[in-house]
Image (cartoon, rainbow, N blue to C red):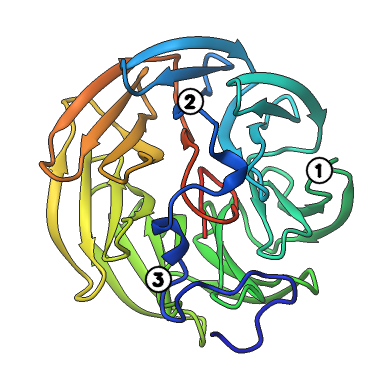
Amino acid sequence: MLPDLLPGMPPPLEPDDVYAATRQGLAPAVQGFPELIYVPNGDSHTVSVVDPRTASVIRTFPAGRVPQHVVPSYDLTTLWVNSSSSNTLTKIDPATGTAIETIQVDDPYNLYFTPDGKDALVIAERLRRIDFRDPQTMELRASVSTPCKGVNHLDFSADGRTFVASCEFSGQLIQVHTAGRTLLRTLDLPRGSKPQDVKLAPDGSVYYVADLNRGGVVVLDAATFTTTGFIPTGKGAHGLYTSRSSRDLYVTNRGAGTVSVLDLASRTVRATHSLPGGASPDMGNLSLDGSTLWLSSRYGSQIYALDLGTGQTTATIDVGRGPHGLTVYPQPGRYSLGHTGILR
């Protein structure tokens, strides 16, 4: 067991794998939920609900202006749609796949939850803030101002006591103290960097950070907050997803229209899968069984199903314009850290 965990945080099921619980099946709270794909269409201002079994849209509903991501709540019972331009969070009931309530908050580009479940973190990108809110009511509790531009993605350390966030428009990373709600450190990446998604390695030793402009993944030492390497993957590296086995990291290369498979043991790319011509793979998540990676095409109007065994695209589904941070739900695991479904 890891020492000095954030108080109230569930300990990992395996001391060297923070994702071990995602191989244990569905939590009781989500057992009856239908497996559906929720796609926020940023340019159409809607959410498409897709049935992966029939590869068809079964429902579309309005969700504020510029919906960015669909995010599972910490307790797994709610999905939240982040609509940054209308300053709203829309609640979806995953038992029915329908919207049930809308709450006003400031500039919700992204949404995360602390590993103890005490706080929701609304990432107010435009306002250069991280807002700590009540995870149920979204009432504001505290704010951390960021010294950088374009804060948008983050992940937590293995002990939950800190998190690392990327600042897209100033090419920086920041480290924040979870319980203290204070900025600890800032790191400048090489000139021209544009950091995107952040993902902790299964053993907690490093973070992987997608760098859109440099076309690859930064390796960041979790203990020292220093970069220790860079792995080229493809033009426009953006989204990061860990395989169910915790052996691979899937990297979406938005500019190249590809997905790279990064072997985490050797930190080398062992395969690259191409999506159909014109695809701009962005954000998404694994299917319930982990065999398929569902991805939005950010600059189109489609989502894609990538078979991770064969590397073939098995479905292309038309949705709204500008699909962004889709989630597949439910997901296996005990609790959600947010984004498009970071479960542990």
Q: Are the two marked residues, 1 and 2, in contact with CB atoms closer than 8 angstroms?
A: no
Q: Is 136 positioned to the left or the right of 147 in the image?
A: right
- Which residue is located at x 74 percent, y 76 percent? 7
- Which residue is located at x 67 percent, y 36 percent? 78
Where, by quadrant of the figure, is residue 162 drawn?
bottom right
Image disc number at residue 202: 3
> Residue 48 at what x, y percent from top left?
49, 17
Image disc number at residue 39: 2
- Which residue is located at x 26 percent, y 30 percent? 305
Q: CA distance from mark 3 to mark 1?
A: 29 Å
> Can residue 190 be seen in the rendering of this structure?
yes
Q: Are the two marked residues, 3 and 1, in contact with CB atoms closer than 8 angstroms?
A: no
Q: Toward the viewer: 254 or 276?
A: 276
> Residue 290 at what x, y percent from top left?
31, 46
Q: CA distance from mark 1 to mark 2?
A: 22 Å
Image disc number at residue 136: 1
As drawn, 302 above or below 256: above
